[in-house]
């Protein structure tokens, strides 16, 4: 049914529920699976983009790469335990929802399996929800795990 499942994670316990479901589904269907994580761009402070020194910019990027590698290693370990062969991708300097939607299209994924943190409606309005954005705008089905 699904040939390529995109599985987003931010490394949290909640997102690992989505990883688990996505991996089990991929294994049961014999589907290809790609695990994705994204790291945000430089923060915006008071409506302005932070203009860091070159050293600060390198440090920011290096820390994002380290964090992404740790997140993906955790998901890869679970995939290995389940016997699922997966690819991984880190998208730097992007909102998670944008990275997920772009990669799903680029890789030809036909399902996105992801977790929701289950925040309240008020928090979604104030803070936004990456899962909410993906669900509302994805051209492919989205499996949301809670």
Image (cartoon, rainbow, N blue to C red):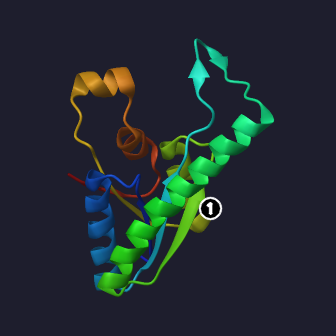
On screen, residue 69 versus residue 47, left or right, reads left
Q: Position of residue 113 (x, y in %)?
A: 35, 61
Q: Position of residue 31 (x, y in %)?
A: 41, 81
On screen, residue 124 versus residue 34, left or right, reads left
Q: Residue most toward the right?
A: 54
Q: Residue most toward the front?
A: 55
Estimate how packed mark 1 is, as few (under 14), some (14 to 19) or many (20 or more) residues with alpha carbons within 10 Å. few
Residue depicted at 40% across the width and 56% down the height? 9
Does residue 93 sit above or below 3 in this rendering?
Answer: above
**Residue 111 visible here:** yes
Residue depicted at 44% across the width and 60% down the height? 71
Residue depicted at 51% across the width and 54% down the height? 67
Does residue 98 sit above or below 74 in this rendering?
Answer: above
Which residue bears the numbered disc 1?
106
Q: Position of residue 81 (x, y in %)?
A: 31, 83
Q: In the picture, which quadrant includes the N terminus?
A: bottom left
**Residue 1 visible here:** no
Residue depicted at 35% across the width and 39% down the height? 132
Q: Position of residue 44 (x, y in %)?
A: 60, 22
């Amino acid at each position: 049914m699904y040939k390529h499942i995109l599985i987003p994670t931010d490394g949290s316990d909640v997102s690992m529920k989505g990883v688990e479901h996505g991996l089990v589904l991929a294994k049961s269907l014999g589907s290809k699976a790609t695990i994705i994580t994204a790291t945000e761009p430089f923060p915006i402070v008071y409506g302005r983009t932070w203009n860091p020194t070159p050293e600060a910019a390198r440090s920011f990027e290096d820390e994002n790469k380290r964090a992404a590698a740790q997140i993906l290693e955790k998901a890869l370990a679970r995939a290995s335990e389940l016997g699922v062969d997966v690819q991984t991708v880190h998208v730097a300097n992007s909102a998670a929802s944008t990275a997920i939607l772009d990669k799903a299209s680029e890789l030809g994924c036909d399902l996105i399996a992801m977790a929701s943190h289950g925040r309240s409606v008020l928090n979604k309005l104030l803070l936004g929800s990456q899962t909410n954005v993906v669900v509302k705008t994805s051209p492919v089905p989205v499996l949301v795990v809670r």
